[in-house]
Image: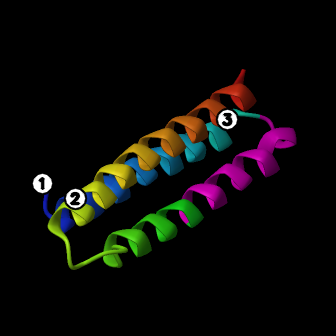
Amino acid sequence: MASLRCIKKDINYLVNEVVSDCYTALYFKDQSKREDIIAIMEEAVDFRNQMIDRANHPAEKKSRSLVRKHYQQMRRDMMQQIDALFEKLSAICK
């Protein structure tokens, strides 16, 4: 099992990638899509805050296997949400 520090670093790295791609899209796209791109950035930051909160407060601290399952589910949720954010951004930038 990865350490809590590594999980938090992964969360921050992936959300920063989404945000940096949004900034790049803001620079190259016209002003009509600005609000949509900013909404994706806000959604990414909200997601980051939720994931950090979930990482800091696992549901069951008593059982090691339940804690491990909690973090595995977190990683699956994180990857699904990050993929969804990238898909939204690519749909806007077409």
Please, what is the three-letter code of the amino acid marked with disc 3?
A: Lys
What label does residue 9 carry, if any?
none
Residue at left 78%, top 46%?
A: 36
Measured in 3D between alpha carbons, the distance from the residue under mark 2 to the one under mark 1, in whole angstroms, is 7 Å
Residue at mark 2 to residue at mark 3: CA–CA distance: 30 Å
**Sequence order check, earlier mark of 2 and 3:** 2
| Mark earlier in primary sequence (2, 1) | 1
Magenta segment boundaries in residue numbering: 30-45
Measure how far apart labels 3 and 1 are at the Cα level. 31 Å
Q: On the image, numbered disc 2 is attached to which residue?
A: 68
Tell me the residue that label 1 is attached to: 1
Mark 1 surroundings within 10 Å by alpha-carbon count, few (fewer than 14), some (14 through 19), many (20 or more): few
Residue at 71 percent of width and 46 percent of height: 37
Q: What residue is disc 3 on?
A: 88
The outermost residue toward the right is 32
Q: Residue flagged by tag 2: what amino acid is it?
A: Arg
Q: Residues within 10 Å of mark 2 (few under 14, many from 20)?
A: some
- Cβ atoms under marks 3 and 1 closer than 8 Å: no
Image location of residue 31, percent across then percent down: 83, 42
Q: Would residue 31 be found to the left or right of residue 12 on screen?
A: right
In percent of width and height, residue 64 lies at 16, 67
Which marked residue is nearer to the observer: mark 2 or mark 3?
Answer: 2
Q: What crowding class fits label 3: few (fewer than 14 Cα within 10 Å), some (14-19), or many (20 or more)?
A: some
Secondary structure state at the residue bearing disc 2: helix
